[in-house]
Amino acid sequence: MFAKERKVGPKGQVVIPKDFREEVGISPGSKVIFEYMEDGIMIKKEDRETEKVFEKVAKSGKKVTRKIDAHEAYGSELEDRN
């Protein structure tokens, strides 16, 4: 892991170093998530994988035919919580 120092501008803005942006695939228009942690702030790229899957299904015009049994899903959820 490596670190770089940056100054915070008058509006609270910080420039993410180019090599960091390239490494994680952040480009103009990308969304990032700021997460407060006890020892600082984590900035991470928004995970849009799920959204891409739904877009692909929607564009394909195919129907989703998998049916979910609500009682089974509820039981499974309760087991996972224990």
Image (tube, rainbow, N blue to C red):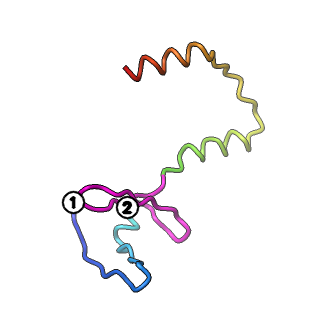
Give the residue drawn at x 40%, y 66%: 22
- Residue 5 lies left or right of residue 66; in this view the side is left
The circle on residue 48 is none
**Residue 33 part of the magenta-drawn span:** yes
Give the residue drawn at x 27%, y 62%: 40
Residue 6 location in percent, x, y? 29, 79
Question: In what quadrant of the picture does the N terminus appear?
Answer: bottom left
Q: Outermost residue, right direction? A: 61
The circle on residue 1 is 1
Residue 69 placement: quadrant:
top right
Q: Outermost residue, bottom direction? A: 10
> Which one is in front in this view, the residue at disc 1 or the one at disc 2?
2
Question: In what quadrant of the picture does the C terminus appear?
Answer: top left
The answer to whether residue 36 is above or below residue 69 is below
Q: Look at the image and give the residue range highlighted in magenta.
A: 24-46
Give the residue drawn at x 38%, y 57%: 35
Question: In the rendered structure, which amino acid carries the disc numbered 1?
Answer: Met
Q: Secondary structure at mark 2?
A: strand
Question: In the rendered structure, which amino acid carries the disc numbered 2?
Answer: Ile
The residue wearing badge 2 is: 43
Residue 3 location in percent, x, y? 23, 68
